[in-house]
């Protein structure tokens, strides 16, 4: 009888184990399309054995108590997880950078259905026409109109680049919020997992799935390192700085630039904001490359692509190669803005310098003083006295051309909103004679309103009102055909260098083509890298899914197996039941 009832226990063990296995399989099937779900696999084990004799000569007499579920495995491959998160971070970095480069190309090549290069070409053609008849009002008006159109379209492209910078800035803000939310989620899941698994009885599988999913998402945003402690806590570092620990998560704060509104992420818990000391999340002292293992994370790519200010020609002109590559050259948007503005600055200053030529004041000072002095004191219109040095630029009043009104100084084609081209000054000689000198107001590198930059440029209103004021006459009244030819030839002069990495001089027309070509090459490199990494990420994820993914066909196979096992255990119990009933009723 004892063996009979013991056999019932074996049958019950089979029923229970098969039922639990069916439940696990059903749970897998129910979560086939659940994001982040990891399949659960049942492992069976023997129940305890009962020993009947310890004195047997050959072996112990033992009776097993059936089967039990030894464990429900939460199947993951930590090596595939790390590889996936690393490559996902790199893919996000190059994808975001390529997106910025693509937008820049779009702004240059399409403005209201017409490429910006067309406006540049039309402006050049207007000077070719002017050279035929400099005193013809039709051609003068054509130059003024094309100048307005040129500046308008250039400003539209420049404004578009700035607008996209602010779009990137918004994305940066959103990414910081997402990073903080994921950090909070991981921290909260750590605590919940620790509570569930504290008794060493149950595995918090659903919570672990959610935490692993959060790590996947975080790895695409920032460069992370992580490890799990013995008590189930996952500690996470971002850019080498502790982000999630056993106690809390350290929020990434936002620093706002007062001038531009640009956001820079920084570590609040490591910074002393009251003293103005900030520890930025990203340090760009090391070159970004795969070899340096720092080309990871969408947030870094966005901060780098946006840059930290709105660039103009001063961010590329006169820079050495190393300084440029460590600053402007690192950012897609800064490079695009600076190179575009350098082109406009070059065209504007070259034309203005032909229309309103400057010379150093040394010869004028020598002439006025008979060679007795190298500096002179001059009086400005407001009565202020200033010293005029020999290296100061002044209008070449003897050789410059004038407009139809014959006035000096002549009108420049392009003006700055914050500064006139010249300041009028008067020099009084010992004999009482006076000479008017027009002092050139140099561009102020600290004040964009006093620079010939797209941020402060416009076409001279005086020329818009009266195109004949455009300098085209010699001071004796003759038409200055030589000046018109020089203006037309300006476009062919090799006066510009794209950036310090390109030492070859080029004309204005060639400069634009080089600029677009460089941006296209840059975009192609990052685009092809992003595409390649996309394939790598997909390949690794496919390998991961073979481990963690739920296959409905496979689970249905398991379900049939466990159902058959359940039926077998049920039939086994029925047989034992009939046997016991027979023994009781027939032999009892």
Image: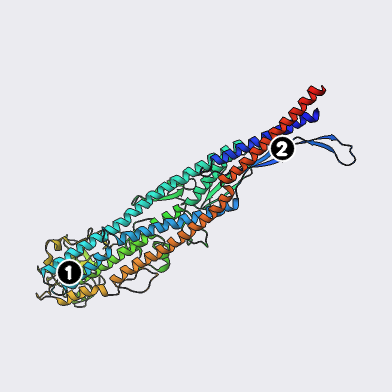
Instruction: Work out whether mark 2 precedes mark 1 in sequence or the reverse, and give the earlier one.
Output: 2
User: What x and y, as percent, mark residue 316?
Assistant: 35, 65
**Nearest to the observer: residue 113 or residue 222:** 113
Q: What residue is drawn where x is 86% and y is 41%?
A: 59
Q: What residue is drawn where x is 17% and y is 63%?
A: 145
Residue 294 seen anywhere in this rendered image of the structure:
no
In the structure shown, which secondary structural element does the residue marked by tag 2 occupy?
A: strand
In the structure shown, which secondary structural element does the residue marked by tag 1 occupy?
A: strand
User: What x and y, as percent, mark residue 518?
Assistant: 37, 67
User: What x and y, as percent, mark residue 81?
Assistant: 56, 51
Decide: few, some or many residues near mark 2? Use Cα within 10 Å; few <14, some 14-19, many ≥20: many
Residue 560 seen anywhere in this rendered image of the structure:
yes
User: What x and y, as percent, mark residue 102?
Assistant: 37, 59
**Nearest to the observer: residue 172 or residue 376:** 172
Residue 86 relative to residue 342: left or right: right
Camera-nearest label, 2 or 1: 2
Residue 13 relative to residue 543: left or right: right
The circle drawn on residue 67 is 2
Quarter in which the C terminus is drawn:
top right
Q: Residue 439, relative to residue 251: is it above or below?
A: below
Q: Residue 96, relative to residue 233: is it above or below?
A: below
CB under 8 Å between callouts 2 and 1?
no
* Total tally of numbered discs in the picture: 2
Residue 200: image quadrant is top right
> What residue sits right under mark 1 in the picture?
437
């Amino acid at each position: 009888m004892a063996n009979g009832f013991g056999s019932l226990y074996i049958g019950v063990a089979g029923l229970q184990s098969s039922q639990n296995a069916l439940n696990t399989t059903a749970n897998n099937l129910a979560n086939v399309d659940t994001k982040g779900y990891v399949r659960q696999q049942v492992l069976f084990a023997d129940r305890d054995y009962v020993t009947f004799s310890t004195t047997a000569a050959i072996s112990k007499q033992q009776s097993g108590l059936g089967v039990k579920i030894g464990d429900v495995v939460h199947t993951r491959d930590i090596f595939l997880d790390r590889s996936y998160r690393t490559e996902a971070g790199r893919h996000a970095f190059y994808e975001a950078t390529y997106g910025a480069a693509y937008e820049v190309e779009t702004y240059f090549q399409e403005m209201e259905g017409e490429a910006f290069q067309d406006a540049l070409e039309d402006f050049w053609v207007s000077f070719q026409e002017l050279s035929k008849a400099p005193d013809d009002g039709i051609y003068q008006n054509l130059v003024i109109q094309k100048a307005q159109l040129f500046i308008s379209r250039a400003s539209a492209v420049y404004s578009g680049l700035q607008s996209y910078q602010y779009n990137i800035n918004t994305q940066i803000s959103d990414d910081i919020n997402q990073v903080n939310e994921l950090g909070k989620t991981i921290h909260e899941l750590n605590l919940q997992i620790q509570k569930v698994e504290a008794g060493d009885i149950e595995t918090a599988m659903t919570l672990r799935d959610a935490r692993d999913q959060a790590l996947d998402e975080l790895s695409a945003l920032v460069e992370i390192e992580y490890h799990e402690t013995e008590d189930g806590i996952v500690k996470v570092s971002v850019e080498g700085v502790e982000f999630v620990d056993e106690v809390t998560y350290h929020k990434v704060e936002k620093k706002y630039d007062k001038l531009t509104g640009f956001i820079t992420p920084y570590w609040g818990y490591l910074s002393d904001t009251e003293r103005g000391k900030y520890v930025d999340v990203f340090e760009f002292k090391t070159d970004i490359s795969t070899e340096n293992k720092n080309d990871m994370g969408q947030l870094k790519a966005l901060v780098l692509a946006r840059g930290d200010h709105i660039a103009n020609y001063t961010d590329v002109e006169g820079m050495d190669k190393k300084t440029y590559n460590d600053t402007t050259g690192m950012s897609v948007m800064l490079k695009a803005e600076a190179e575009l503005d350098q082109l406009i600055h070059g065209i504007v200053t070259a034309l203005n310098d032909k229309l309103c030529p400057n010379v150093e004041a040394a010869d004028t000072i020598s002439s006025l003083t008979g060679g007795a002095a190298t500096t002179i004191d001059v009086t400005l219109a407001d009565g202020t006295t200033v010293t005029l040095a020999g290296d100061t630029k002044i209008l070449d009043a003897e050789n410059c051309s004038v407009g139809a009104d014959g006035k000096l100084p002549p009108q420049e084609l392009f003006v700055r909103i914050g500064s006139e081209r010249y300041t009028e000054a008067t020099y009084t000689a010992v004999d009482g004679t006076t000479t008017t000198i027009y002092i050139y107001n140099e561009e102020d590198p600290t004040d964009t309103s006093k620079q010939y930059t797209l941020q402060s440029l416009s076409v001279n209103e005086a020329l818009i009102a009266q195109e004949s004021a455009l300098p085209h006459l010699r001071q004796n009244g003759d038409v200055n055909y030589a000046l018109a030819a020089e203006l037309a030839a300006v476009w062919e002069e090799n006066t510009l260098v794209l950036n310090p990495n390109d030492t070859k001089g080029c004309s204005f027309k060639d400069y634009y083509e080089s600029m677009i070509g460089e941006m296209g090459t840059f975009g192609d490199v990052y685009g092809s890298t992003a595409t390649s990494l996309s394939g790598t990420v997909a390949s690794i994820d496919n390998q991961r899914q073979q481990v963690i993914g739920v296959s409905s066909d496979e689970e249905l196979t398991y379900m049939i197996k466990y159902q058959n096992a359940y039926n077998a255990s049920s039939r086994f119990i029925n047989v034992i039941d009939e046997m016991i009933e027979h023994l009781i009723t027939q032999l009892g």
